[in-house]
Every structure is written in structure tokens, then in C-alpha cells.
Image (cartoon, rainbow, N blue to C red):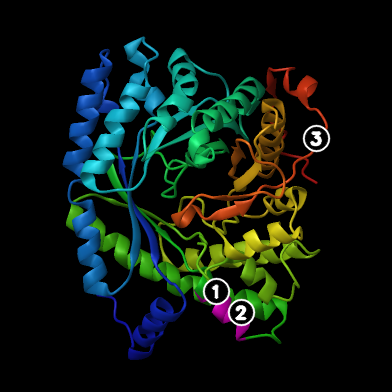
Amino acid sequence: MTRFSAQEIIETIRMVQMENLDIRTITLGISLRDCAHPDLDTLGRRAYDKICRVAGRLTAVAQAIEQEYGIPIVHKRVAVTPVALVAEASGTGDYPRIARYLDRAAAEVGVNFLGGYSALVQKGATPGDMALIRSIPEALATTERVCASVNVASTRAGINMDAVAWMGEVIAETARATRDRDGIGCAKLVTFCNAVDDNPFMAGAFHGIGEPDGVVNVGVSGPGVVLSAVQKEPGADFGELAGIIKRTAFKVTRMGELVGRAASERLGLPFGVVDLSLAPTPAAGDSVARILEAMGLERVGAHGSTAALALLNDAVKKGGAMASGYVGGLSGAFIPVSEDAGMMEAAALGSVTFDKLEAMTSVCSVGLDMIAVPGDTPPETLAAIIADEAAIGMINRKTTAVRLIPVPGKGVGDRVEFGGLLGRAPVMAVHTLSSRAFVRRGGRIPAPLQALNN
């Protein structure tokens, strides 16, 4: 049995009470492969029944662990097999019907988001993949809890530029379909390169095809804890700073492992991974941007921001890897604009620009995340942004993603309020030069040579 000293317990209490330490999510991965059926309503009912059966006790178990350990668990969520795989046999394109069954199941088990309305098309699309992608705007506009994702590229397959171009149109159409809510549907839609099978964080979570029938994955957080540790050592050099962050990440991850294994045992499902990403919230003191500024930057976006983020990301991974035998997911630091108070402020002041964010994504754990852009941004420009981000992921063998929100009727400098953890953000400028001819070439950008690195 793991034993903890009195000092460790007091330290953890302080981190929870003073530094916003929490378990960001317990995400239950559920395979729907045994729910496939040519009739979509039968498929939907099977999926609904299985989710309710497997995840029925998820919320109660998580709340019991919260009470017992005194550790907040912010979200309880469900991720399912990519729906394009499950629904392919139906031969019909009315996939939003499945989304609505999933939405009802999510409501029934008490989770706020369910991920897995997804397709994996990095090398090409099947009829089922195409039906799902075509249905995304309607599915996200007619459900509250369903999240969608599409993987359009990988280091091994290259970039499917036909899918990239299509996703530009899908994002624009999703914004239009949810225009009465400032395009909120796009906040539930992620376009990936190198998507992982065990990511517990929404909106990009899905239950990968190499996973067991059901599995418990945990996502920890803790920007406030790391910020506090960095602020206490203003004179430390970068080697010392990396060591401080590693030790902090170790403590945070160990708590995630403890909670994940407790949930696994009580739910009777295998323990999957701890995703040790630093996930910010709009709350004061829970910002990744503030950590970078505590390292000595006047404001995030200043020269040096990418180097600071690289140090942070690497130190978090090293510390977390020592604390758990099963680290997975995305693991690193998220830099969503609307969900990070420091990032929102920097974007509003113009100190962090779209191009600087793109540079920073080469070293963070995901990519261009929760960025509001003008509502009249052409679909080809959205697609070109996806292509740029996918190229960073493909060449650097890392996961990258794009979650852009073209806000209908709003332009650069306007503000948008999404509410809750989705936060608020200024509408940021993107380049207005046309990428239409580039995007319309189509085809697939070949996979990169993985030798002769430079």
C-alpha cells in the first residue's frame, strides 16, 4: 500500500485549496463495436443501452471518490468508438440520428460531454467516414453533449488534403448552423493530426480501436500548482526551474494515478492512462500563460514564449512519467485562448498573435485551440490553417489539432462569450491573403522521410 507522509498530505490540501489543483476529468472509454447494425435506430438503441449500463455508476463513483479523498473531480465524461466505424454498415447518411441517441445517453448518465462522433481519414475516406463528416454540422447543432473529431493526417500517412479542404467547409457550416449561439458548435469540433486512442480530454476524445471494451482514463490538471512553484523561485536558472516543474508534475500525476485506480476498481473496468496535461481554465491563477510570464516574460507572446513553453511541456512529461507507469493521452500543456485567462488577456492586448500561437503549437501538447476568428473567414482559409497545423504535427511526429470558431456576424476585436469552462475570447485576426488555389489542389501530401532529420 502506498503511504504518504503528513507533509505530503498537507501539501496536497494546500494545492487543492489554494492552487486550483483538481482532477480535470475521469473519462470512461466504451467500445460500441458490438452495437453495429444496418438499422440506425437499432444501432442507436444498442449504443444508448450499453453506455447507460457501463457508465451508469460513473458519476456516483466519481462523487464518492471526491468525498473520500477530498480531491475535486471537475468532469465525468464518456468517449466511444469512432461512430464512422460503427455506423458504416447502415448504408444511410442519416447519422445525426445516432448523435441524438448518444446525446440522450450522455444526459442519462450525467456527463456533460461525450466524445467519439469521429472519423479517421488520414489516408482516405470510406462511405461511412464521408457520411459522418457530412453530418457533423447537423449533429452538433441538434445535440448538446456530443463532441466530434476528424483525424486528417499522420506522420505515417501524410496529410489528406481532400479531407482538410472539406473540414474547412464543415467548420464554416457548423458555425452557421449554430449562429444563434455564436457558432458554439465549432467548440465541440476538433480536426487532428496524429490523434491518439486514449485521450480523455474533450472535444477530441474517442475510444480507439486498440482499446479494451471499457477503460478508465484520467486527465489531471494543475497550472496553478506549477505557477505557484515557479513564482517561489524567481532566481532559479532554467535547469533548476525544469527540476522544480518536474517534481511538481510528479506530485500532480501521482494524485491522478491514485484517483484513476480507485475509479477503475469501483467500476470494475481496467485502468487505462493518466493524461498529465496542464489544462487551464478561465479562473484566476489557473493559467498556462501565467506560468510562462512567471518565467520572466512581460506578457505571453513576447519573444521567448516558445522556448518557455517547450521547457514547461518537457518538464511536465518527465515528471509525470516518473509518477505513473501508464502515462498516455496528449500529456503536456494546453494553450487554448478562450479557456486561459492569461491567454485571453494577451490576445485582447495583441501581444499574442495567430502566427505566434502557431509557432507555440510546435512544442505544446495539442495545437490551435479555442480561437475565435471572424465569421466571414473563407472555408479555404480555415482549411489552410488546418493544413499548416497538420504539417507541424506530421513533421514533428506529434499530435496537433485545430479548434477554430468562426463567429457569425463578428469581426476582429469583437468579443465572444461561450460560458463556463469554454470561457470568452476576442475575435483574432487571420491572414486575409487567399489560399484557395492551394487548398483546391486536393490529393494527399506524402508522408515525410523519417531519416535524414535536420
- Residue type (three-letter) at the residue carrying disc 3: Thr
Q: What element carries label 3?
A: loop
In this view, the residue farthest toward the top is 91
Q: Residue at x 19, y 53 (%)?
A: 267
Q: What element carries label 2?
A: helix
Q: Residue 230 carries which label?
A: 2
Distance from Cα at disc 1 to Cα at disc 2: 6 Å
Q: Is residue 44 left or right of residue 314?
A: left
Distance from Cα at disc 2 to Cα at disc 3: 39 Å
> Where is 222 relative to 229, above or below?
above
In this view, the residue farthest toward the bottom is 6
Question: Crowding at label 3, few (<14), some or many (≥20) Cα neighbours within 10 Å?
Answer: few
Asked if marks 1 and 2 touch (Cβ < 8 Å), the reply is yes
Residue matched to label 3: 432
Q: Where is residue 254, by image quadrant?
A: bottom left
Q: Is residue 138 left or right of residue 311?
A: left
Q: Which residue is drawn at 26% across and 42% down?
A: 107
Q: In which quarter of the image is the N terminus?
A: bottom left
**Between disc 3 and disc 1, whose residue precedes?**
1
Q: Residue at x 61, y 53 (%)?
A: 425
Nearer to the camera, 300 or 84: 300
Asked if marks 3 and 1 touch (Cβ < 8 Å), the reply is no
Q: Residue 226 carries which label?
A: 1
| Residue 325, position as x, y percentages in the image | 40, 60
Nearer to the camera, 318 or 307: 307
- Residue type (three-letter) at the residue carrying disc 1: Val
Which residues are the magenta region? Answer: 225-232
Residue 16 visible here: yes
Question: Crowding at label 2, few (<14), some or many (≥20) Cα neighbours within 10 Å?
Answer: many
